[in-house]
Amino acid sequence: MKQRGRHRRRRRGRALRAALTGAALALTGAATMISASQATVAGDPGALKPLAATDALRLTEHRVPAPWLDRLSAAMGGPVGADAVLGSADRTLRDAADCAAGEREALPVSPAATRAYCWDAEDTRGWRPGAVTTSSDAGAGGRWGSHRVVLSAWSRDDGTSGDGIARVSFVDADDPARPVYTSALLAVPVDGGRDYRALTSPVSGMVWYRDKLLVTAGTGDRNALYVYDVDRIQRAGADAGAVGRVPGGWAAYGHRYVLPAVASYRLADTPDAARPAAISLDRGTVPAGLVASEYVPAGADRPTRLWRYALGTDPAHAGLAATDSAGHVDAREAYETGATEVAGVLAHRPAGAARSDWYLDGPAGDRDGRGTLWRQDTEGARATECGADASRQCWSGPPGSLSYGAGTDEVWSQSGDMLFTLPLTSVDEALG
């Protein structure tokens, strides 16, 4: 029986690789047919330029008072951990071989994904995909407890708040042939912990470090990041479309779980304050770093800033950014780049290198077309190319956030309805 199971998995793996290769070849062929007028790509962003003035990148930490969190937790019956959430996963991701051709068009042409999945269409209808992070970010061993986990953020306009709501899908990826998931609503405690509201922001960046989940926020009160504790997930028993306390219990827009924020980071109160739009974890520095990019639209008459915050090493401050005595978080490294509309950012220092390479993805010319993936350092930039015309429109479209796990050498990203992964080594090979 075990041998037959292995044969089935091998056949399924071969079918998946064939589907991905076929999709990549078809898309490469399409890339060679793009006319000169359609093949407008983002210009070379050039070398990274070190940025000396970093006051505009400063954040200030604000903790949610412990009594608020304790009051909310007690009222909701006590927290549950990520293991309980994963154990109740009741939806299945389909592998690329079973996804529609239109869904697979979002996958990169070069380098090609090695594994890819599409979501349960009924569950994601009306939701917009956002950032991705994995248990490789959470712990150096690549697992959370005994599980390999992928977290995927989603947002939608709920028709009531005006700014929308956000959730995170917890994917149990222990069996690559059949990942399963369930979702938790992201919330913010209010009224002294007697209630909570939805996080009213799309999540364009997300990092899971130790027991903390850091997400980008574009709310009007100048909060730049919100922090969640995966050990403080709460059950929301009331099956209602509302959010917060309702007659008979607690609601989370129909979800069974809710994550209340435990802290936030606020932007500097200056006109040039930089809001993190894309973030990722870099374990290649000591201490580990949170790297970030702001979003600058194409045509703006200014460069895009990239920077790095150090993450704390104090056990009492586990999973949070390193702060000074006033609660300030200052950038430890910062650059300017000519790239615009950056959707995902990674920093990785190759063995023996003095500085990190920075990887940025974003749209290439036509917003509805494929994206471009760049690797930059202080000496120059290079993009992945594909097709006979060496088009740079080879990455996923639309491009999304990037998450890298050094232990597995996997880069995860999400585009449209597709969640996919590929080795960073294959990215570097495609870059030459």
Image (cartoon, rainbow, N blue to C red):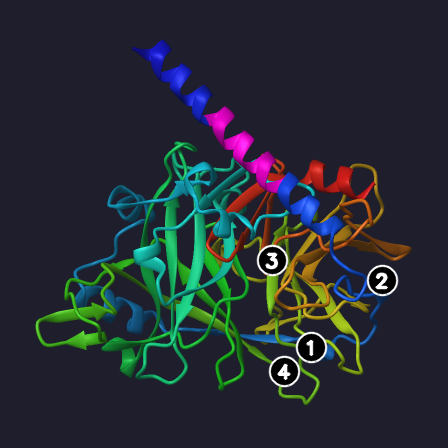
Mark 3 → mark 4, Cα distance in angstroms: 33 Å
The answer to which of marks 2 and 4 sits earlier in the sequence is 2
Q: How many marks?
A: 4
In the image, which residues are magenta? 13-24
Circle 4 residues within 10 Å: few <14, some 14–19, many ≥20: many
Q: What is the C-alpha distance between the residues marked 2 and 3?
A: 19 Å
Q: Is residue 103 left or right of residue 124?
A: right
Q: Is residue 290 visible?
A: yes
Estimate the x, y position of residue 200 in percent, counting from the top left.
41, 77
- Residue on which the image places disc 2: 44
Circles 1, 4 touching at the beta carbon (< 8 Å): no
Judging from the image, what secondary structure is the residue with disc 2 in? loop
Mark 1 lies on residue: 297
- What residue do we see at 21% from left, 72% from top? 241
Up/down of 206 relative to 2, above or below? below
Q: Which residue is mark 3?
A: 397
**Residue type indicated by callout 4:** Ala
Whichever of callouts 2 and 3 sits on the residue coming sooner in the sequence is 2
- Amino acid marked by disc 1: Pro
